[in-house]
Amino acid sequence: DIVMTQTPLSLSVTPGQPASISCKSSQSLLHSNGKTYLYWYLQKPGQSPQLLIYEVSSRFSGVPDRFSGSGSGTDFTLKISRVEAEDVGVYYCMQGIHLPPYTFGQGTKLEIK
Amino acid sequence: EVQLVESGGGLVQPGGSLRLSCVASGFTFSSYEMNWVRQAPGKGLEWVAYIGGSGSTIYYADSVKGRFTISRDNAKNSLHLQMNSLRAEDTAVYYCAREDYYSVDDAFDIWGQGTMVTVSS
């Protein structure tokens, strides 16, 4: 199974400051079709997870442009250019290339200072 | 409105059974792959099971293989998870999630609100 490793596991950020989360996979997530099946989700307190980013860097509908994803192969990053209070929650990366199983990172908890 | 609504959770004794349901609305259910994802209290997300649009392709996590059965009824826009031989470690919130191949490269783009399953004597 592919192991997804996120760092850091927690993050405390002042509003307006940037934040960055790393996600590393134990195998390449690049498919022979040229797509890389790496996703980012946010689970706000008391809510279900919601999709933020698909295929490494494509923002899902309605996701603010302060969120951006980057990376390739086995190393990926989610960046928030200017953190807002509504961004608090737990961020998860997930791989969707080597199935089964889909695997998630451990989660990164973002708090506001 | 596109939505998924789960039901069927509750308290069950170890070794018991429970059947979860997820009713979809607002989209052509049969065109989408579906998944169950769970989250133990205070823990992260764990994928549980997958079913293709026609129901012919099914995958399970090793932790539930042989005990859980995923199924769907496209005529009733519903997804199910039959859980047998339940263990304490199956205690979790269970989410159903739509997998969208067409628009978001198989991401889980729609999630239900979750249903809590507690396995305890």
Image (cartoon, helix red, strand yellow):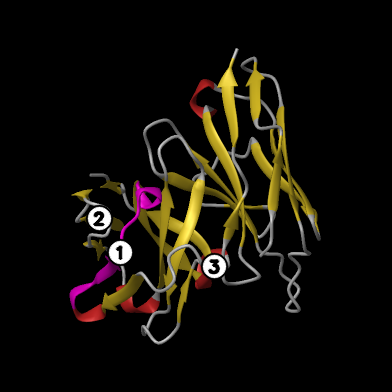
> Which residue matches tag 2?
B6
Label 2 resides on the chain identified as B
Q: Secondary structure at mark 1?
A: loop
Asked if residue B31 lies left or right of residue B11, the reply is right
| Residue at point 71%, 69% (across, down) | A35
Residue B1 in sight: no
Q: Earlier in the sequence, mark 1 or mark 3?
A: 1
> Which residue matches tag 1?
B85
| Residue at point 33%, 73% (across, down) | B69
Disc 1 to disc 3, C-alpha distance: 31 Å
Type of the residue with mark 3:
Asp
Q: In the image shown, does B120 or B82 lie closer to the viewer? A: B120
Q: In the image shown, does B19 or A93 lie closer to the viewer? A: B19
Question: Is residue B37 shown in magenta?
Answer: no
Q: Secondary structure at mark 3?
A: loop
> Which residue matches tag 3?
B106
Where residue A68 appears, as percent x and y from the top left, is: 68, 43
> Is A111 above or below relative to A36?
above
Q: Are marks 3 and 2 on the same chain?
A: yes
Q: In the image shown, does A70 or A63 lie closer to the viewer? A: A70
Disc 3 to disc 2, C-alpha distance: 21 Å
Quarter of the picture containing the N terminus of chain B is bottom left
- For the record, the magenta segment spans B76-91
Q: Are marks 3 and 2 in contact (CB under 8 Å)?
A: no
Type of the residue with mark 2:
Glu
Q: In the image shown, does B88 or B19 lie closer to the viewer? A: B88
Disc 2 to disc 1, C-alpha distance: 21 Å
